[in-house]
Amino acid sequence: MAFMESTRAAGIDPVLAQSFRVSARCGCFMQAARSLNIKSTQLRKHLAQLEAQLQCSLFHHQDAGVALSREGLQLQAQLIALAHEHDVPVIEQPLIRLAVAESILHDILGRDLVSLLRRNASVRLDIITLDSELALQAISADVVLWLAGTDSPLPGPSFAISEPQPLARLEYLPHIAKRYSRVTARPDSLDDLADFLLVQWQHDRQIESFRPWNSVVDQRLAGVVQLHSYELMLEMIRCSACIGLLPQYMSQFDRSLIALPGLFEQPMQRQVWMAVNAGSQRQADVQVIVELIQNTFNERREWFQS
């Protein structure tokens, strides 16, 4: 309110003045649009309207960005003085806490979260990665995305949540990098795995539905690597001729990897579940995150079809 009063006192539309102030501070129209959470075309329209009103150019291009003209510097100084005079408050954005299973964050949700941040640089988001059932039980968040059994979301979060929503059923299969495995040499039985180095993410050792794979790994006296990092496990499969257990969608996420079906008779499956904190489920900013997650899984639904 104070900023609106100060800009009106200067005879400038508050929206146009805010677009100018952020653009001047960022020195980049794209970054300024992100900060204002508007499209860059809309920002440029605001600036063009302001320049037409003042009958002068406020910016000129310089190197990879933009810089203020002499008139732009004068306007910036005027608005800064008015802002100090009216004691402009900083508008605090609500903090949204998002807890996500580590593999889902890396493989499925990460790219869309980056897109959200590119569009809105003023968001306050606390992203918590879940790498174990203990971590799921220990956290408190506004939105939770976790992996559990196909028939039940338990064990789930320990705080009050909305009804858990199933988003996708994931099938898990051993994977290998294409460049390390010719079609004629790929393993087609459990005995054939003896010729390959196996890599296992430690988090998967406690998953009951992964018992067929874990039994093979546990029987190994050599040729096995245990890792606490999901991302490092992926890198070892890509670059070290290892075989590891991954979701069947992985060949969609990374075209260099290929699944090895038919090695296990018993299917290895998990379900992705989502729930919202009962105390914050009606907040608009929380709903933005929920809709983003739902849209992400809807757009990738072909990933999860066996």
Image (cartoon, grey):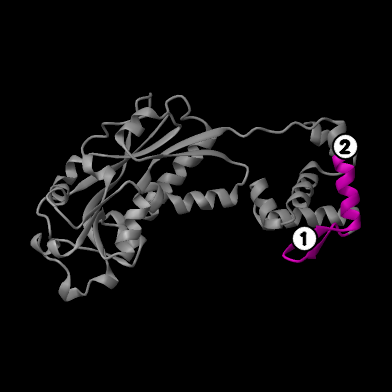
Q: Give residue 223's quadrant in the image.
A: bottom left
> Quick check: 256 left or right of 190?
right
Depth order, front residue of 300/201: 201
| Image coordinates for residue 141, horizontal then vertical, percent | 44, 31
Asked which quadrant contains residue 232, the reply is bottom left
Tell me if residue 123 comes above or below residue 163 in the rendering. below
Magenta residue span: 57-81
Residue wearing tag 2: 82
Q: Residue drawn at (55%, 33%), measured in percent from left and top? A: 95
Percent x, y of residue 120:
60, 47
- Mark in front: 1 vs 2: 1
**12 sits to left or right of 303:** right
Instruction: Give the structural element (helix, strand or loop) at label 2.
Output: helix
Q: Which residue is mark 1?
A: 66
Q: Give the residue at x 83% y 36%.
A: 83
Q: Amino acid at mark 2?
A: Leu
Where is residue 108? Give x, y as percent. Answer: 39, 52
Residue 243 vs 17, above or below: the answer is below
Residue drawn where x is 65% and y is 32% of the image: 92
Q: CA distance from mark 1 to mark 2?
A: 24 Å
Asked whether the beta carbons under mark 1 and mark 2 sit within 8 Å of each other, the answer is no
**Magenta segment: does it hold 9?**
no
Residue 150 visible, this orientation: no
Horizontal side of residue 41 vs 133, given as left or right: right
